[in-house]
Image (spheres, helix red, strand yellow):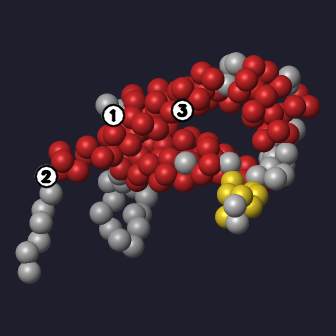
Amino acid sequence: MHVQIYNLKQTNVGYNLGVVGVALVLAWIGIYKFTPTELMLIEPLIANHPAMNWLYNLFSVQAVSNMVGGAEIIVAIGLIVGFKKPTVAFYSGIAAAAIFVVTLSFLITTPNAWKISDGILVTNFFLVKDILFLAIAISVIERNRPQSNCKSRSGCKPKK
């Protein structure tokens, strides 16, 4: 049996491209959140989400859109900085994963998110892309998880 061993540098290409792609899309969409057009597009998503709709009781629709956009831009920057700073990558990966889990949950919380078109069940496909983005965010978390100094499989005892 022949086992192919890949060069680590070669296997990083897909990962790096994925992270840059996610960062680019997050920054782009984050910037767009500051526009009236995107504000109108996300308002019904947030208004119908039980974990987010309370934000409109405290802040204006524009302020909420700006906060979401600002968070997306910060996470995008963190993902890029994470290429040199693994701790930043780890926490940015967690934040990105949270963004994509919330975005995917809009498929459940938004009325009429699913419909039948030409006999096929379809949805707002701009949300579905976040399945792939979530996978990349999880890869960032896994790759940059802080390593413990403990080598034992049964756990480490605290130092006295």
Q: Classify 44 as above or below 114.
A: above
- At horizontal 36% and vertical 50% (from top left) the residue drawn is 143
Percent position (x, y) of residue 29?
59, 29
In three-dimensional space, the C-alpha distance between marks 2 and 3, rounded to whole angstroms, equals 30 Å
Mark nearer the N terminus (1 vs 3) = 3
Marking on residue 26: 3
Q: Earlier in the sequence, mark 1 or mark 2?
A: 2
Q: Amino acid at mark 1?
A: Phe
Closest to the camera, between mark 1 and mark 2, is 2
Task: Looking at this view, name the residue that lies furthest to the left.
Answer: 2
Tag 2 residue: 7
Q: Which mark is residue 83?
A: 1
Quadrant of the rendering where the C terminus is positioned:
bottom left
What residue is at 82 percent from the left and 39 percent from the top? Answer: 44
- Image mark count: 3
Distance CA(mark 1)–CA(mark 3): 16 Å
- Residues packed near mark 3 inside 10 Å, few (<14), some (14 to 19) or many (20 plus): many
Comparing 94 with 11, the one in front is 11
